[in-house]
């Protein structure tokens, strides 16, 4: 049973290891693809960076121009009954870019004063303005105003601080739009490339997390496998010990079977000896007591032809062809003699 359980655990661990290796291969393959995608995104980013470096200062200049505006400046500018020459062009350009040049709007200071009616709201609107998506028709109209010689922040600064800052915002936001328009396709390509890279990285992370979870399960399976192998080794060793014991016992039983025969023969012999013990002992005792002084020929004559005949005559039981030497000694002693 334990050997069967160990075999199941080993098979399960091997299957899980094969599965982990398969998933790791997939993860490595996807990681390679993700690396290529990331490299492509970096190339696009590098191509865009030079253009972005051009765009950012322009946008910063436009932002700075708006940040320099305050309500007091705007109110001062609005208070002009007859504004300095060229300053109404600033409010015309701002109105055009903000899309406030529809009817009943008309170019000139009257519409300009109306635009400046709520300075705080106008400043916030300029700050929130997205220079990346200005309709082309607005840019075309604004370009006609910007092309005029008087439309210059430095020139406007001598006329009105608010007009100068608004003029700077118009010039820079239009410049920003034109440069950004050229960069936008590259930025879109960059966003798409970064999106693909992020998606690939997320997929690789998901695969790596999956592999990590599988590796944890594999580690547990390997531990179970090792424990099962150790248990199986113990079972095999125990089985070997039992087998050795059985073999030893079998040899012992086989040996004892032979001993049983010998013991049976010995018992039979001893029973027989019990019947003839009196004569056997009497003859052997006589042999020891009296025959030692005579030579071999006389000894044999004395105990074979005299004593044994006398015992037979008196019907004293004894073994047939009894040899007193074999009664008194054994084969090992005979060998030493």
Image: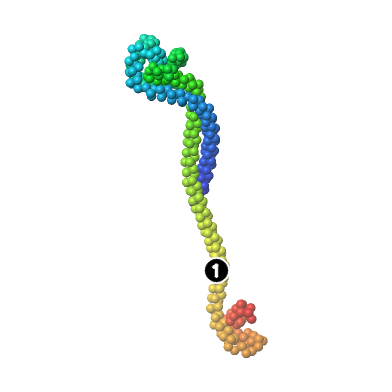
Q: Quadrant of residue 66?
A: top left
Residue at figure coordinates x 51%, y 45% from the top left: 13
Q: Position of residue 315 (x, y in %)?
A: 56, 83
Of residue 272 and residue 146, the one placed in the foreground of this image is 146
Q: Position of residue 161 (x, y in %)?
A: 38, 20
Query: In the image as oriented, which residue stretches furthest toward the right?
Result: 297
Q: Position of residue 148 (x, y in %)?
A: 45, 13
Of residue 336 and residue 32, the one placed in the foreground of this image is 32
Q: Position of residue 61 (x, y in %)?
A: 43, 24
Q: Quadrant of the C terminus?
A: bottom right
Residue 274, placed above or below residue 217? below
Query: In the image as oriented, which residue stretches furthest toward the front?
Result: 158
Residue at figure coordinates x 40%, y 18% from the top left: 158
| Residue 313 seen in render | no
Q: In screen coordinates, is 184 left or right of 289?
A: left
Neighbor class of circle 1 (other Cα within 10 Å; few <14, some 14-19, many 20+) is few
Residue at figure coordinates x 64%, y 87% from the top left: 299
Q: In screen coordinates, is 22 left or right of 133?
A: right
In what element is the residue under mark 1?
Answer: helix
Count every numbered label the image shows and give the total. Answer: 1
| Residue 43 seen in render | yes
To which residue does mark 1 refer? 260
Residue 126, placed above or below residue 280? above
Residue at figure coordinates x 49%, y 46% from the top left: 219
Of residue 66 and residue 72, the one placed in the foreground of this image is 72
Color theme of the render = rainbow
């Amino acid at each position: 049973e334990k050997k069967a359980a160990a075999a199941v655990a080993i098979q399960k661990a091997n299957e899980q290891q094969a599965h982990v290796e398969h998933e790791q291969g997939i993860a490595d393959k996807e990681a390679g693809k993700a690396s290529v995608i990331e490299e492509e995104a970096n190339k696009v980013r590098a191509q865009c960076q030079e253009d972005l470096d051009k765009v950012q200062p322009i946008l910063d200049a436009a932002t700075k121009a708006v940040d320099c505006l305050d309500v007091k400046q705007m109110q001062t500018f609005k208070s002009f009954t007859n504004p300095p020459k060229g300053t109404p062009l600033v409010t015309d350009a701002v109105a055009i870019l903000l899309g406030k040049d529809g009817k009943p709007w008309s170019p000139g200071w009257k519409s300009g004063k109306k635009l400046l009616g709520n300075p705080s709201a106008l400043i916030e609107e300029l700050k929130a303005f997205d220079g990346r998506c200005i309709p082309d028709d607005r840019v075309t109209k604004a370009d006609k105003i910007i092309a005029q010689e008087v439309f210059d922040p430095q020139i406007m600064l001598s006329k009105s601080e608010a007009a100068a800052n608004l003029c700077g915002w118009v010039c820079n936001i239009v410049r920003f739009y034109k440069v950004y328009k050229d960069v936008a396709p590259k930025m879109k390509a960059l966003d798409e490339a970064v999106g693909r890279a992020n998606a690939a990285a997320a997929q690789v992370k998901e695969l790596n997390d999956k592999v990590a979870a599988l590796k944890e399960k594999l580690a547990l399976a390997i531990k179970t496998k090792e424990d099962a192998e150790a248990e199986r080794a113990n079972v095999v060793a125990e089985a070997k010990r039992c087998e050795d014991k059985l073999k030893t016992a079998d040899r012992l039983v086989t040996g004892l079977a032979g001993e049983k025969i010998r013991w049976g023969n010995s018992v039979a012999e001893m029973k027989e000896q019990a019947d003839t013990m009196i004569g056997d002992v009497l003859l052997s005792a006589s042999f020891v007591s009296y025959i030692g002084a005579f030579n071999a020929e006389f000894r044999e004559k004395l105990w074979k032809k005299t004593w044994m005949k006398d015992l037979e005559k008196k019907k004293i039981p004894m073994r047939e062809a009894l040899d007193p030497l074999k009664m008194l000694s054994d084969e090992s002693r005979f060998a030493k003699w």
